[in-house]
Image (cartoon, grey):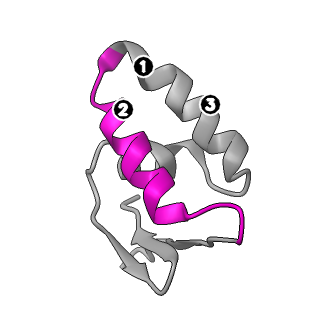
Amino acid sequence: MTKMPTYRLLSSELVHTPGIIAWAINAYAFEKDRPAFLTIMTKTFPTLPETAVEQLLSEAVPYTVEDEDVVFTIED
């Protein structure tokens, strides 16, 4: 059985991560904007692999909001 990685994207006083993720998912719906948003998100969350960003923004995997953090598990 393969272990699927779980990620927790933290909010801070300056960044409300659930809002950023909702904004990015909305923008990712437009095919021409996808490369730019992949870059924005991988630079904003540098420890997050591009495959995880793709799965999150395309809504291939669900996410939850715990306190002010976004938590999701990707599929390998």
Name the outermost residue toward the bottom.
67
Asked if the stretch drawn in magenta spans residue 37, the answer is: no
The answer to whether the residue labelled 2 contacts the one labelled 1, judged by CB atoms less than 8 Å apart, is yes
Asked if the stretch drawn in magenta spans residue 26, the answer is: yes
Q: Quadrant of residue 32?
A: top left
- Amino acid type at circle 1 is Asp
Distance, label 2 to label 1, CA atoms, is 6 Å
- Amino acid type at circle 2 is Tyr
For the point 62% across and 71% down, the residue is: 11
Looking at the rendering, the stretch of residues picked out in magenta corresponds to: 13-31
Tag 1 secondary structure: helix
For the point 50% across and 52% down, the residue is: 20
Residue with the mark numbered 2: 28
- Amino acid type at circle 3 is Thr
Which one is nearer the viewer's eye here, 40 or 7?
Answer: 40
Q: Position of residue 29 (x, y in %)?
A: 27, 30
Q: Position of residue 74 (x, y in %)?
A: 40, 63
Tag 2 secondary structure: helix
Mark seen at residue 39? 3
For the point 73% across and 50% down, the residue is: 46
Name the outermost residue toward the top.
32
Tag 3 secondary structure: helix
Q: Quadrant of the N terminus?
A: bottom left
Residue with the mark numbered 1: 33
Q: Quadrant of the C terminus?
A: bottom left
